[in-house]
Amino acid sequence: MSIFLRKAFRFGPVRLNLSKTGFGLSAGVKGARLGIGPRGRYVHAGRHGLYYRKQLSSGKSTATPAAAPDKGCATAVLTLLAIVGGGILLFILLGNPVLLGLVLLSGAGATVAYGVRHWQRRKRVLDYKDGLDRELVTLSTPPTPDTITMLRQQRQRVADCRDIRKELLVIETDVYEAVLDQILDNGYISEIEAARIAAAEKILGLDESRRLKTKKDIFSAAYVEAIGDQQITQQQLDHLHNLAQGLALPAAELEREFEVIREIRAAQILKPPFEPLPAKDQQVKVQKSEDVYLQAPAQVLSQRKSRASATGYEYTVRREGTLVLTQKRILIAGGGNTIVGYDDIDDMDVDIDQGFIEIAKTTSGRPTIIKTARPLYTARLIDLLKDEA
């Protein structure tokens, strides 16, 4: 299913918005609620821990598609019976009782043989499912190499027809998520639990993209919970590193998340007095009475409504230059100047996803939108400089 995140919180008067296009997650109030699949599985991260909930494949969950009849096999049986019935009618009309008897015997034998084959297929599927539940869901220790080999062989013996493949996908997805469900009950992944995840991935036939998405969704739930508290503690940071390592998530998949975390942690330790930049390092001329506290590349954007955009707006670059923060004002110099005095700031929105700060002003209904590499850090510094002005 399509999943998105829409979340806002404040750093003092600075409101942080994580927009729809960035994190692949749906969130409600504090914490995050993540929907997975059409059968009601979800991840929910509360303020006191990470909870990953789903319907287990074992036990009394008999309503899952894993226990559904094999529609393809049933269709084949009905087709065979129709052929036999047609043959009986034909030979009755021909008046050949001997040949009719042979056809009846052949048809009955073929039907019995097909039924036995179908029953064997079903038994192999159920044996494989029971083995997965026993070795991966019920036990708290990782399966031995011999057990892994045995389960992989069981999977290979399962009939490779279309309907069986669909059923296997449902079974293996349930088992994989059940393993993660149990492991993440306390929000921490030990070495033994990481080994259980690795063993499950060796056995199950789930493709890499499906596994990666499930694990990334789990990490994202904890990530949203961490940044939603406005202050990322060392404990929360350690928890996120533990999840990333225990789930064996590639560093490239989490690059943006940890970049945001580093920016939030840098912003949360900001406090006056600030050390101004040396005059020799200043790229933009300011008034003699001004000190420069931040200097960075930036763009000033124009905003207009757009039905084609996921956010409802589209943006174009109006000015590109250097952003300068002094104790009096915000200045973007380049092809002209954009200036916002601190006393003119009514509110600020920070969009981490798109990397810009939207400044609502008391003297104008049109906001000033500044795109920069560290929007949250910059907005936090603006907030503090505004208080000092």
Image (tube, rainbow, N blue to C red):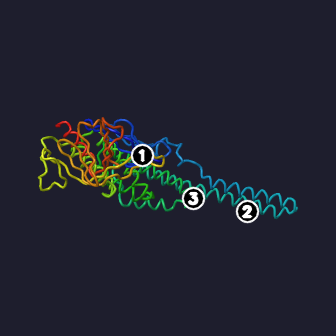
Percent position of residue 191, x then y: 28, 53
Percent position of residue 46, x then y: 34, 37
- Quarter of the image with the C terminus is top left
The residue that disc 2 covers is: 106
Q: Could you tell me if the residues under marks 1 and 3 are in contact, i.e. CB atoms within 8 Å? A: no
Label ID, residue 304: 1
In front: label 1 or label 3: 1
Percent position of residue 331, x then y: 24, 47
Label ID, residue 162: 3
Q: Is residue 123 left or right of residue 379?
A: right
**Element type at marker 1?**
strand
Q: In this view, does 300 lie above or below 108?
A: above
- How busy is the neighbourhood of tag 1: few (under 14 within 10 Å), some, or many (20 plus)? few
Give the quarter of the image for residue 14: top left
In front: label 1 or label 2: 1
Q: Which amino acid does label 1 sit on?
A: Arg
Q: What residue type is labelled 2?
A: Ser
Q: In this view, does 263 lie above or below 343?
A: below
- In the image shown, does 23 or 14 lie closer to the viewer? 14
Which comes before the other along the chain, label 2 or label 3?
2
The answer, for residue 280, to whether it is visible in the render is yes
- How busy is the neighbourhood of tag 2: few (under 14 within 10 Å), some, or many (20 plus)? few
- In the image shown, does 183 or 286 lie closer to the viewer? 286
